[in-house]
Image: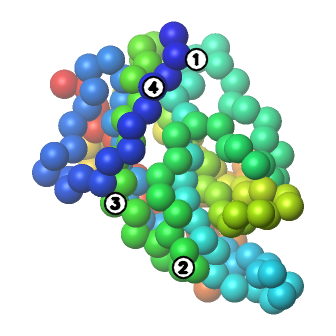
Amino acid sequence: MACASQLQVLTPQRFFAAADGVKAMILAGKNLPNVAGANGMPGPCSAYCSLLLLNKTEQAPDEGLSSRRPAGTPCKVFPSSASPTWNAQIEMRKAVEPGARLLITVWHSGGPGSASGDLKLGRIEIELPPQQNTPLWYTIADDTGVVVQGSGGGYAEIEVQVPPPP
């Protein structure tokens, strides 16, 4: 079944579980890593998240460290910040099977005309259904599971809320 997605910015009061899929609220990031700018000097990233609903038998896409078209449904790009506030709700309409998980990849937008595309900063996986309906901070890791170091020391994190099914 194809995955139709929709991006909306909503307040947490209007946040709910989809009957035939998953809704996730990507709230914020903190301590995201610096990236090399056009001048080669490090600076704050222009981050966004891409969400993909994977059932038990589905594998995460092998996108490498950069991509011109990352898989999944993106939220808006938050420019030049180690601590972006997205407050974006993303709905994925796809049957959720036992053992499903939500893959959230954090990207740095290379911008229009970027030769290498967008740079992968890290990712998390959330097992579905979630155990609670409260926002949680997740430490992002690279594809091998190594935790991503943030720009101010410590770990890079994103705040996500995924409500359990009704």
Gap in angstroms between the C-alphas marked 1 and 4: 19 Å
The image quadrant of residue 90 is: top left
Is 59 in front, or is 1? 1
Q: Amino acid at mark 3?
A: Asn
Gap in angstroms between the C-alphas marked 3 and 2: 15 Å
Res 30 seen here = no
For marks 3 and 4, give the one nearer the viewer. Answer: 4
Does 163 sit left or right of 53 as displayed? left
Circle on res. 87: 3
Q: Residues within 10 Å of mark 2 (few under 14, many from 20)?
A: some
Residue 147, how many percent across, how many down?
Answer: 69, 60
Circle on res. 4: 4
Gap in angstroms between the C-alphas marked 3 and 4: 20 Å
Q: How is the image coloured?
A: rainbow
Q: Disc 3 or 4, which lies upstream in sequence? A: 4
Gap in angstroms between the C-alphas marked 1 and 3: 28 Å
Q: Amino acid at mark 4?
A: Ala
Query: Mark 1 near mark 3, Cβ–Cβ under 8 Å?
Result: no
For marks 1 and 3, give the one nearer the viewer. Answer: 3
Q: Secondary structure at mark 2?
A: loop
Task: Read off the residue under disc 1.
Answer: 56
For marks 1 and 4, give the one nearer the viewer. Answer: 4
Residue 130, how many percent across, how many down?
Answer: 36, 34
Q: Amino acid at mark 1?
A: Lys
Gap in angstroms between the C-alphas marked 1 and 2: 34 Å
Q: Disc 1 or 2, which lies upstream in sequence? A: 1
Q: Secondary structure at mark 1?
A: loop
The image quadrant of residue 131 is: top left
Q: Disc 2 or 4, which lies upstream in sequence? A: 4
Task: Read off the residue under disc 2.
Answer: 81
Q: Residue at x 42, y 14 (%)?
A: 95
